[in-house]
C-alpha cells in the first residue's frame, strides 16, 4: 500500500476497486473512467475548494472566464481589508456583441436617448429637512455598496461589464475542474465514495451505498469539519449586545 497522505492518485483508488470486486486488470480503463466521473461529481457537490484568480479586463469591457471553471461563486474587487467586495449581478446588461472587440463603440452607437439622469436629480419628493435645506429620500437605496455591475455569459465564457466600469481587473472565485498531471489526485476522505460509485455503475453495489460513503467523506473533509474554534466563534458572535435586524 502507498504511503497515506491528504491525496491519493486516482489510479490507486481504481486498483483498490478492482481488488475489492475481484476484477481483472483488463477492466482498469473502464474503472478509471468511472472513477473520474465520480471525482467530478464529488467536486461539484462537496469537495472542490474555490479557486481565486485576478482576471484583466479586455478592451471591450469583458473578461474571459478561466478554461477550467466548472461554476463561479464570486466576482468582485479587492478591498483594503483583503476581502472581495462583490459586484452587482445585473441581468439587464446585454450579451449582444460581447465577444466583439468593438463592443463598447457598438453599444454607444445603438443607445436610445432618454432623460432618466435629469429626472433622478429633480426634487420629486422632499421629505428630510436639515440645516435649512430639504433632502430627497425618494428612491433611496438599501445601503448595499457595490462598486460596479456585471453579467456572466456562460455560453461564450465571458463576464460582461458596464461600458463605464472603472477598474482594469476583477477577482474571480470559482470551482475548478480536477487537475491532471500524470494522474488525477483524490482527497483521501473521498476514496471510499469513489469505490462505491464504481461498484454502483458496474451494478455490483447500490446507489445508497455511494451516497452514504459520499456523506461520510464530506464530514471528513478539512474545510467541512466543525471545529471547537468555529463553535466558540459562533457562540461569541451570537452573544453580543446589539440590535437584531
Image (tube, rainbow, N blue to C red):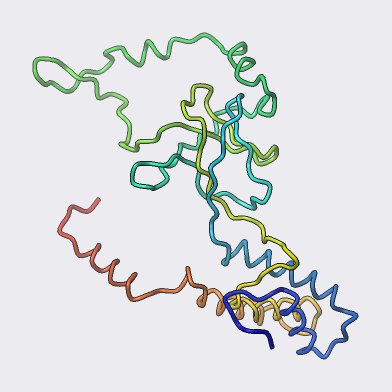
The residue at 48%/10% (across/down) is: 114
Q: Position of residue 124 (x, y in %)?
A: 28, 15
Vertical placement of residue 44 versus 110, above or below:
below
> Quarter-wise, where is residue 78 in the image?
top left
Figure disc tally: 0
Residue 142 vs residue 78, the one in the foreground: 78
Q: Position of residue 127 (x, y in %)?
A: 19, 22
> Quarter-wise, where is residue 240 in the image?
bottom left
The residue at 70%/40% (across/down) is: 155
Q: Is residue 169 left or right of residue 157?
A: left
Residue, far left? 131
> Quarter-wise, where is residue 232 in the image?
bottom left
Q: Is residue 70 left or right of residue 33?
A: left
Q: Position of residue 145 (x, y in %)?
A: 35, 36
Q: Position of residue 140 (x, y in %)?
A: 30, 28
Instruction: State the quadrant of the N terminus.
Output: bottom right
Residue 153 vs residue 75, the one in the foreground: 75
Q: Is residue 198 left or right of residue 105?
A: right
The residue at 79%/73% (across/down) is: 32
Residue 10 vs residue 23, the one in the foreground: 10
Vertical placement of residue 108 versus 20, above or below:
above
The residue at 65%/79% (across/down) is: 191
Vertical placement of residue 172 versus 211, above or below:
above
Amino acid at each position: 500500500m502507498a504511503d497515506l497522505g491528504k491525496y491519493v492518485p486516482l489510479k490507486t483508488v481504481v486498483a483498490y476497486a478492482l481488488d475489492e470486486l475481484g476484477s481483472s486488470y483488463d477492466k482498469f480503463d473502464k474503472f478509471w473512467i468511472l472513477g473520474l466521473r465520480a471525482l467530478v461529481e464529488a467536486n461539484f457537490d462537496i469537495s472542490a475548494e474555490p479557486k481565486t484568480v485576478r482576471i484583466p479586463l479586455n478592451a471591450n469591457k469583458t473578461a474571459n472566464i478561466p478554461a477550467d471553471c466548472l461554476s463561479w461563486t464570486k466576482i468582485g474587487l479587492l478591498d483594503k481589508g483583503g476581502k472581495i467586495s462583490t459586484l452587482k449581478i445585473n441581468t439587464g446588461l446585454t450579451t449582444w456583441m460581447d465577444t466583439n472587440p468593438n463592443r463598447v463603440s457598438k453599444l454607444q452607437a445603438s443607445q436610445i436617448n432618454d432623460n432618466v439622469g435629469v429626472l433622478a436629480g429633480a426634487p420629486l419628493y422632499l421629505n428630510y429637512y436639515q440645516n435649512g435645506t430639504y433632502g430627497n429620500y425618494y428612491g433611496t437605496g438599501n445601503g448595499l455598496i457595490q462598486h460596479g455591475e456585471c453579467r456572466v455569459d456562460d455560453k461564450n465564457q465571458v463576464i460582461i461589464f458596464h461600458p463605464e466600469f472603472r477598474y482594469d481587473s476583477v477577482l474571480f472565485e470559482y470551482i475548478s475542474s480536477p487537475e491532471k498531471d500524470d494522474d488525477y489526485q483524490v482527497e483521501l476522505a473521498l476514496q471510499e465514495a469513489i469505490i462505491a460509485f464504481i461498484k454502483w455503475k458496474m451494478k455490483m453495489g447500490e446507489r445508497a451505498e455511494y451516497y452514504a460513503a459520499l456523506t461520510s467523506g464530506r464530514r471528513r473533509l478539512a474545510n467541512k469539519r466543525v471545529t471547537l474554534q468555529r463553535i466558540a466563534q459562533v457562540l461569541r458572535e451570537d452573544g453580543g449586545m446589539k440590535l437584531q435586524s
